[in-house]
Image (cartoon, rainbow, N blue to C red):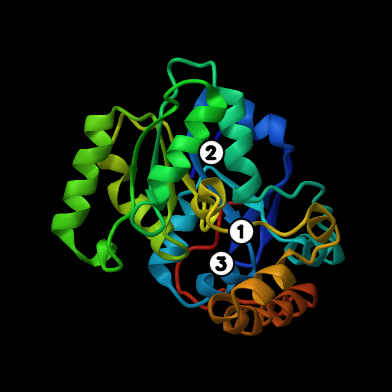
Amino acid sequence: MNDRPLKWPRWPLLNVWADDLPMAELLAHLEQAGGVVYTVNPDHLYHLQHNAAFLRAYRAASVITVDSHYVRLGLRLLGRPVRHRITGADLVPAFCQHQRHNPNTSIFLLGAKPGVAQRAMQRINQAAGRALVVGAHGPSMNFVNDPAEVDAVVRMVEASRATVVMVGLGAPKQEIWIASVRSRLPQVRVWMGIGATIDYEAGEVRRAPEWLRRVGLEWAHRVATEPGRYLGRYVRNSKFVWWMLKDRFGLYRNPIPMADPHV
């Protein structure tokens, strides 16, 4: 984790933290300093209580934004008044728009089903008016457990000369993978874990209407449109309410034995 002085509030969040900064400031920070960005939500908080490799990867982030209305509400109830919510689905198009005229920025998309990342690449490049995305790959389901395939993807990213890698493998795979290969790709200045955002950018999946997003019900749209993918996840992830209550009364303890986060 970067120990530089922060220009924005950083709040404790169970065994990680939440950075509270507006989109414009995040985009300016990434352009100037680069770094690793994750967007925390209840699903991530669930895995962070059970998966040590995921926790280590998360704590190596430069910026952790709040992805969820409910995480933001929980933090506010704890007296940590987070103002800004930045999701991966909002960050990716904002970043691409911000960088569309920067010749030093080029993007590699990794994730989604075969062919989907390529369609996302075409749509992003069409909107940017140039080849902003220089590579795209939909890996196999066993990708992260296959050293040969990992090596092949590292070579793809290296050959593309991308300076930004957006990884949409889902948590906790995408964050653990980023942590495992980051040192092998020194030309990459910005890493993002973006979940299902490649599907959105490709037009494969429609996001919830804006009014549902504003009132914090994007999760309901996801469950209604993809129940097999999301229903069990949201039921399981409701446990974060219990952990936040424990934190409120000073009873929360990190279940994974390692040093407390530097917040």
**Structural distance between the alpha carbons of marks 3 and 2:** 23 Å
Neighbor class of circle 2 (other Cα within 10 Å; few <14, some 14-19, many 20+) is: few
Instruction: Give residue 46's position: percent from left, percent from top.
Output: 57, 75
Inspect the image, locate mark 3, and give the three-letter code of the amino acid beneath it.
Answer: His
- Which residue corresponds to the image point at 45% horizontal and 26% vertical from the top-left? 132
Left or right for 178, reference 143: right
Front position in the image: 228 or 83: 228
Local secondary structure at mark 2: loop
Question: Disc 2 designates what residue?
Answer: 3
3 or 2: mark nearer the eye: 3
Instruction: Give residue 235's position: percent from left, percent from top.
Output: 65, 84
Q: Earlier in the sequence, mark 3 or mark 2?
A: 2
Neighbor class of circle 1 (other Cα within 10 Å; few <14, some 14-19, many 20+) is: many
- Which residue corresponds to the image point at 66% horizontal and 75% vertical from the top-left? 223
Inspect the image, locate mark 2, and give the three-letter code of the amino acid beneath it.
Answer: Asp
Asked if the residue at tag 2 contacts the one at tag 1, i.e. Cβ–Cβ closer than 8 Å, the answer is: no
Neighbor class of circle 3 (other Cα within 10 Å; few <14, some 14-19, many 20+) is: many
Q: Check residue 40 in the rendering and tell me which mark sits there, or answer none.
A: 1
1 or 2: mark nearer the eye: 1
The reply to whether residue 162 is visible in this rendering is yes
Left or right for 53, reference 75: left
Local secondary structure at mark 1: strand
Q: Check residue 44 in the rendering and tell me which mark sits there, or answer none.
A: 3
**Structural distance between the alpha carbons of marks 1 and 2:** 20 Å
Left or right for 100, reference 148: right
- Which residue corresponds to the image point at 74% horizontal and 37% vertical from the top-left? 22
**Structural distance between the alpha carbons of marks 1 and 3:** 6 Å
Local secondary structure at mark 3: helix
Left or right for 231, reference 85: left
- Which residue corresponds to the image point at 43% horizontal and 38% vertical from the top-left? 121
Vertical side of 250 occupied by 78: above or below: above
